[in-house]
Amino acid sequence: MTTVPEDAACAAETDLGDRPPVRATDLWAGASATGGRATEVRARPGVPCREVPAPVPDCSLPVFGWSSSTNEELLGWTGADRVVSGLAGARVAAASDPGQGSLVVDYVQLRFRRGDPRLAGTRTHLEDAMRRCGGGRPGALGGVRGFVATQDSLTGADSVRTVLVSDADHLVWLALDGGPWSSTSTERAVRRTLEQLGAY
């Protein structure tokens, strides 16, 4: 585990290395992992990050919120206390899972102080980006209610399906890439990822 202090000293970044909150084996038992990474950025107590305006969504970017923001920049424009981002990927055979091929889950979790009004403002901004760039609307993914949209895939022929969900103190964005995904794989990946992030 490596901790890298930021120049502005308002945040500390940690490469979670071999202990990411979500692993491929959590999502697909017996599958062959093809990739995994996770990074955590925490605001330093008493040293607020410089506030920056929320980025204008760029629909040509196939990434979180159609924004090229780094995790440190996310702290600045959202006001979150912590950002955890990562991915878990695996090659899945039909014999072990109804889904097939290379399946990837990308995730970003923004955690706020309970009752912080900036959570609602961040959610509104992200939903607007999802609506503008990915046909976003209220809906469900894997049986989980939230705000859903689609993005172009960098790895597969099918579109990336995304969902934004929120609670009293956090927002979580998930994206399912690769495939083809089955309904069983989709439900397990979404629910298990949310469970693992909630426990982290």
Image (cartoon, rainbow, N blue to C red):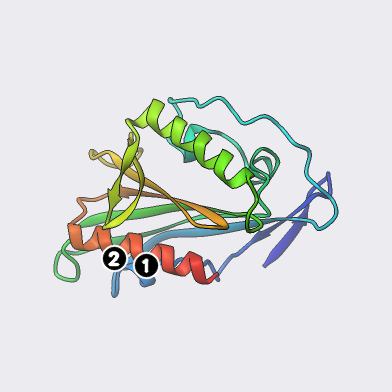
Residue at image mark 1: 192
Percent across and percent down for residue 198 are 50, 67
Circle 1 residues within 10 Å: few <14, some 14–19, many ≥20: some
Q: Amino acid at mark 1?
A: Arg
Q: Quadrant of the N terminus?
A: bottom right
Q: Residues within 10 Å of mark 2 (few under 14, many from 20)?
A: some
**On residue 123, which mark appears?**
none
Against 117, residue 92 (above or below) is below
Judged left or right of residue 28, residue 127 is right
Q: Is residue 179 left or right of residue 56?
A: left
71 or 32: nearer the viewer: 71
Count of labels shown? 2
Q: Is residue 128 above or below residue 144?
A: above
Give the residue displayed 20% in from the left and 63% down from the top. Answer: 184
Q: Quadrant of residue 143?
A: bottom left
Describe the element under mark 1 as helix, strand or loop: helix
46 displayed left or right of 149: right
> Looking at the image, which residue is at 46% across and 31% down?
129
Lateral position of residue 47 relative to residue 199, left or right: right
Residue under label 2: 188
Q: Name the spot of residue 99 as percent of width and height, x first.
A: 19, 59
Q: Looking at the rendering, which quadrant does residue 104 occupy?
A: bottom left
Assign a secondary structure to mark 2.
helix
